[in-house]
Image (cartoon, coloured by chain):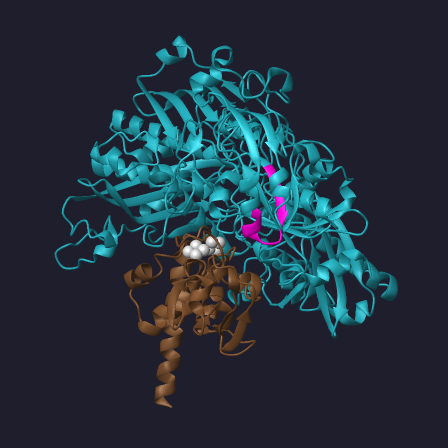
Amino acid sequence: MSARNSATRTIRGEKNLQDITTAHPDGIGGSPLRPDGTLKVRGEFAYSSDLWHEDMLWGMALRSPHAHARILSIDTTEALTQPGVYAVMTHEDIPGSKYYGLEIQDQPALAFGKVRYHGEAVAIVAADHPETARRALAKIKVEYEVLAPITTEEHCQNPETFGYVHEPEEYRGHASGNVVHSQKVVSGLGVNDDVRAMADVVVVGEYEVGMQDQAFLGPESGLAVPAEDGGIDLYIATQWLHVDRQQVAPVLGLPENKVRLTLAGVGGAFGGREDLSMQIHACLLAQRTGKPVKIVYSREESFFGHVHRHPAKMRYEHGATRDGRLVYMDARIVLDGGAYASASPAVVGNASSLSVGPYEVPNVNVLAIAYYSNNPSCGAMRGFGAVQACFAYETQLDRLAAELGMDPVELRQLNAVSQGSHLPTGQVIDAPAPVAELLQKVKDLPLPPPLDTEHHLDIRELPGALSNTSHGEGIVRGVGYAVGLKNVGFSEGFDDYSTARVRLEVIGGEPVAMVHTAMAEVGQGGVTVHGQIARTELGVEQVTIHPANTEVGSAGSTSASRQTYMTGGAVKLAAEAVRNELFNLGRSRYGWTYNDLSLIGGKVVSASAGVLISMVDLLGDQAIDLTREHHHRPTVPFDKETGQGFGHVQYTFCAHRAVVDVDVELGLVKVVELAAAQDVGKALNPLSVIGQIQGGSTQGLGLAVMEEIITKDGKVRNPSFTDYLIPTILDTPPQPVEIMELADPNAPYGLRGVGEAPTLSSTPAIVSAIRAATGLALNRVPVRPEHITGT
Amino acid sequence: MRVTFNANGRPVEADDVWEGESLLFMLRERLGLPGSKNACEQGECGSCTVYLDGSPVCSCLVAAGQVQDREVRTVEGLADDENGLDPVQQAFIDAGAVQCGFCTPGLLVQTHDLLEREPQPSDSDIREALSGNLCRCTGYEKIMDAVRLASARKCSSNSSEVSQ
Ligand code: FES
Ligand code: FES
């Protein structure tokens, strides 16, 4: 037996690291239960933090207390002599490349020369107990020369005065100065005085979005096991196994095939696991010590260990005719990318190309730009550059409606895109785009009953809830609407294909389909959908989900709302290929000439001749095992100067209506109801689709009224769930959901990616409702009590 | 130090426990009971909720040594038998209340306790009882559904037992 197999065998809690088989009649369109649900409710599902290996060590990182400093020296001698400490490593001990990164390889695996953000990893240790590791970290002496942090837009724009985050000779990609990436979009006549003169009404606003954290509950963690062949087996919670491997292997100085990744249980992701966290560190320590190494971040470390949503400063200007037609939009979107590039270039691409929202605007001029700074690195989070813009353009639309004396929903409907509309990138929306209908759907839902403090007072339903801050006095209700525009899949010419392997064989007298992909199941329910697709295409009940690993080709990332579209599409292709192979088997064996074959209920059926044979009899002891890749239609990069190009794979739309009660004296907000309507093309699993919409909407609620990472001079002030608040069940209202299913002819089953769109419009809808209740401008999220009370 | 106590109805013993270890760490890393989760380890998320002598507690806030000779019941011990599921567990699966599932063990214990105390809670009762349990995936709607479902099922099975 290879070292690898024996290592796998001794990992505790491995049930989900093995095949999971479930039987169910439901194919797509049904809501069969999750194959991993039973393990999860029994506490037997092995998350990456649950893994355990005999002889395992604990890894831990020493992090910079400064946002910007030169490292003068690192002394590890004393730490190394601590009993129970097996290794202490700095950048000097890295066998391969010292850098990694998703889009631009600019991030050191361990800092050298300089630290560029508060919490950057400087050294790592492996020890026999987490406490031993912690104490060893305290013995590492790092001498810093503290530098002035580059933290504001003004700093970033003036490197001659305030300095460079990266030395100019180190810039990679399109980065230069302190700019990571920028993108312009110009369409129609652009925006100039002549265009401005065509508008009867102009609204200009400046908007700000704070830095939001993904706050997935399962901390970054994993287990690296050294293998006899000199390679490493890494059990990890991530969003994309293959891109992790692509970044880890060069740092270890290993070829990719010596770094094998298996997905461990993932406790949520939301973009925060797109970048590496502890992967390289655990592998380096395992390589160095020859022992399995587990790293589990604490919640505090997690706040430093992953990138966040880009905070944004935006200036938007809209011009419209008196009857409400948009004439032009001018927008400048400035994103703080933080110390390292992460996904900033793609976020800029999204922010610029989606900056107009789901509206037809004939003349557009946009600049989106991301800076480097000594603030925490920012990258992917659900909504990916479209969230920030949506807050700005939806606030603008509300203000424009007020200016015109129009109903805000009607103004949106009047300007809404539909199938055939041109976006400012020149891309034509070639699939249904029911924006006006979605708005109508949320508008038509019955409103929740008014607050009745006379007859029924439950303070748990009021702003302030159990804090007992009000018994109904000072509470004002407001209603607000918003809608958003999001893309699905990777854009700008990137071929983010997915691979799936499907195997059909008879086990225990029944046909069983096995689905093997490298898709990261992060909670979204992709494994459920894969089973449904296999059942639909192969007419079986029993489906086995193989653990996700790098033995099969890439499945791309579990992000960009793309997995059901892309890997689901790959499973469909592979299953169809298996089905054809099975038919060919019958044709060659029995001389069938039918062209009307299908697989139903475990049998081969001809529409004209009825049941031909059972799959069990046809297959015998033969297995059909085929792998297919699914590529979406090609896209192209946006032109650097004009932003023109067929840049996105698919568009998706969600609308919200928010109802809030505001305690105007204390500035407390209670969201009373948050209704959503979304076109999903085809709901492969309606239960999961609704769960995605409600979960995404709730993250938007968090951004609207509570969630923000606070930094001061680059230092993070609130890295805990005590100080960074996410919505609790008391903060979260009932959320009626209306689903539309207008098929996209380009997508498998007509489906549309679901996960992100609801995160966009939830935030501006809630803030719009707060404005309706208070009459305040509220140009910044999250809205804090002091913004409402003015104190 | 050595800690002996009762976990899910079985006597257990952990050796070489460091004084600073939490009950959560001891369960997860020393006793092979990783079901209780470690989302914050500072009493803010509820993912580590277990019964201690019949009351739900955040096991990350309980020192390992404090449970000497006491009864601990974790998510692994919620079901009556090895292969079955408690009605609360079944309801969470059926209602779609489990996405990533990291919050689930804590929510199950907390919900189990709620329904023991109050078999037919109002929505506000549910929200109040579960307000210490964070979930980042679901937006809580399906969790509300799951608790309502578990309550309805428990009540109907209790009433059919009574009528028999
Ligand atoms: S882990 Fe105990 S409350 Fe969060
Ligand atoms: S299901 Fe992921 S945190 Fe609740």
Q: Quadrant of residue B118?
A: bottom left
Please state which of residues A31 and A83 is positioned toward the viewer in this rendering: A83
Can residue B19 be seen from the camera position used here? yes
Single out the residue that lies furthest toward the bottom.
B164
Judge whether residue A124 is colored magenta: yes
Chain B, hue in figure: brown
Q: Position of residue A532 (x, y in %)?
A: 61, 59
Q: Position of residue A398 (x, y in %)?
A: 31, 31
Give the answer, above or below, for where A270 lies relative to A150: below
Asked whether, in this view, residue A78 is left or right of residue A159, the answer is right
Please state which of residues A504 and A36 is positioned toward the viewer in this rendering: A36
- In which quadrant of the rendered image does the N terminus of chain A lie? bottom right
Give the answer, above or below, for where B35 lies relative to A669: below
Please state which of residues A781 and A26 is positioned toward the viewer in this rendering: A781
Single out the residue that lies furthest toward the left.
A454
Residue depicted at 79% across the width and 72% down the height:
A617
Can residue A595 be seen from the camera position used here? no
Asked whether, in this view, residue A622 is left or right of residue A724, the answer is right
Give the answer, above or below, for where A254 lies relative to A568: above
- In which quadrant of the rendered image does the C terminus of chain A lie? top left
Q: Quadrant of residue A719?
A: top left
Judge whether residue A753 is colored magenta: no
Numbered circles on residues, count: 0
Instruction: Give the magenta part as a residue range.
Output: A123-133
Residue depicted at 47% across the width and 33% down the height:
A386
Q: Position of residue A540 (x, y in %)?
A: 67, 66
Single out the residue that lies furthest toward the top.
A193
Asked whether, in this view, residue A721 is left or right of residue A663, the answer is right
Asked whether, in this view, residue A584 is left or right of residue B163, the answer is right
Q: Position of residue A159 (x, y in %)?
A: 51, 14
Chain A, hue in figure: cyan
